[in-house]
Amino acid sequence: MNILIATSEAEPFARTGGLGDVCGSLPKALAAVGQQVSVILPAYRCALAAGQTIEETGCEFDVQIGSKTVRGRILKSRLPDSKVPVYLVAQDDYFDRPGIYADADGTEYRDNCERFVFFSRGVLEAIRQLELRTDLIHLNDWTTGLIPAYLKTELRGVPPFDSIATLMTIHNLAYQGVFWHWDMLLTGLDWRYFNWRQMEFFGNLNLLKTGIVFADAISTVSPTYAQEIQHEPLGCGLEDLLSYRSDVLAGIVNGVDYELWNPATDPNLAANYDATTVSQGKPQCKAALQQEMGLPQRASVPLVGLVGRLVEQKGIDLVVDVIDRWAGHMDVQWAILGTGAKQYEEQLLALAARFPERVAVKIGFSDPLARRIEAGSDMFVMPSRYEPCGLSQLYSLKYGTVPIVRTTGGLRDTVTDVSPANLSDGTATGFCFEDYASADLAGTLQRACQYYGQRDVWSKLVQNAMQQDWSWTASAAKYAGLYQQVVTRRRQPARA
């Protein structure tokens, strides 16, 4: 099957988070299971500077954006260590900028709607002019939401577009691409589609809603999240629409590229290890992390790691409250890396200053340090308010770092709570709590620390975690099956 993955991010060309990881890894896994797959994204400044070989295709095109005609061209590259083609939609006025969606100070580009209208048009022009054989376009988030709308309206009955199926993946429903209603003019679509059933959202234009309405099928990045977004509050105003389309809504957990995330080969660690050598390698990584973070090098004290955005969605308010109540008397160390809301950055830094032997905080992001925290910590905490999939808990499992999570979204789907029964049958991989409350997080951390003192039980738990397989292989096979279902369903009316 011929699959075109349309996305605003794909590692190593462009990445701000999980979307870039997924669209950089999934295509290679799909190719490995026999799919003919290619990727298309904007030719951002960072994409052109990513160190990959990029060539001209000779394809140029003009599209109408509102009242003006805009010219673009298509470039070509490949995903590293693969034969997967990558096409880049180039238009310097739109994409030759310091950031992907925003300036360095976080200010979103005011013409983001116009930029991704152009990108959506460019994807369809690439299919037309490069004669890309396409059975299905795998769309990702709001930046691609207009593509199925164009296929179902302007291009309905027009070869080769009339036979192309679409799958819209929602990576985080909180980001919907909502713009003022006059941006509808930029899309070129008839105003009749600006209604509450299709593109309108509380008086504004909503591009993610557009994609959900017009796509042939919808997926999210975990089965639990697919259920959660059909109800308040995680439906973010689209719960009724998603419930209405639940018959074509699926959830597939993201995978991990174990060639990149593997403690046995990770060059950033003080010592490499696998499941057979974790008892020798992990203590070395812990001691090195304690030294790097300025914590006392104590092997017996539990070390809790946290890496991520310091925002309420990630449960940082719960973490701050627990550390504030614990650090004065609980013999537990914390290693925290991240950046986010100023108030949480300041609160964490203040705690580190008050309790320097127990709390270490680095504001910012460093991929090498993130890996060292994964390898050197005994536990990894993710008390998220909501979590569509989550990747850090999957990294933690591979690195033998026991995850402590709230049971939401992909965290529920990937971590099995420690209980006597689950320990007995070998399925326990971490510690889970249900209610979003600091008391529940504290109680679960205390339970984890009690098990940490039982070395035989803890060693078994680490082994259970490290033997989990959350590679892309299984997820890619599920996507391939879903693609086949969507394409078959799309073609049935034509045969009838």
Image (spheres, rainbow, N blue to C red):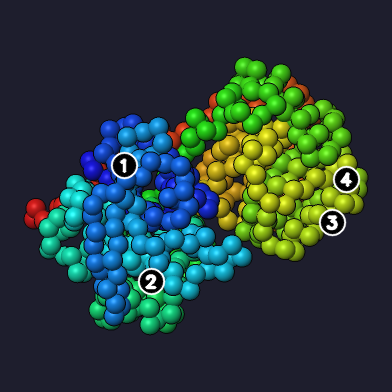
Who is closer to the viewer here, 92 or 13?
92
* 275 over 342 or under it: above or below: above
Label 1 – label 2 distance at C-alpha:
26 Å
Q: Nearer the viewer, mark 1 or mark 4?
A: 1
Give the labeled residue for mark 3.
350
Circle 1 residues within 10 Å: few <14, some 14–19, many ≥20: some
Q: Look at 79% across and 40% down and name the residue there.
A: 293
Residue type at tag 2:
Glu
Label 1 – label 4 distance at C-alpha:
50 Å
Say which label, 3 or 1, has the lower sequence index: 1
Circle 3 residues within 10 Å: few <14, some 14–19, many ≥20: some
Give the labeled residue for mark 2.
114
Looking at the image, which residue sits at the far left? 496
Say which label, 3 or 2, has the lower sequence index: 2
Q: Which type of secondary structure does the marked residue at label 2 adopt?
A: helix
* 20 over 119 or under it: above or below: above
Q: Nearer the viewer, mark 2 or mark 4?
A: 2
Residue type at tag 3:
Ala
Q: Look at 51% across and 60% down and name the residue there.
A: 99
Q: Which type of secondary structure does the marked residue at label 4 adopt?
A: loop
Give the labeled residue for mark 4.
356
Say which label, 1 or 4, has the lower sequence index: 1
Give the labeled residue for mark 1.
85
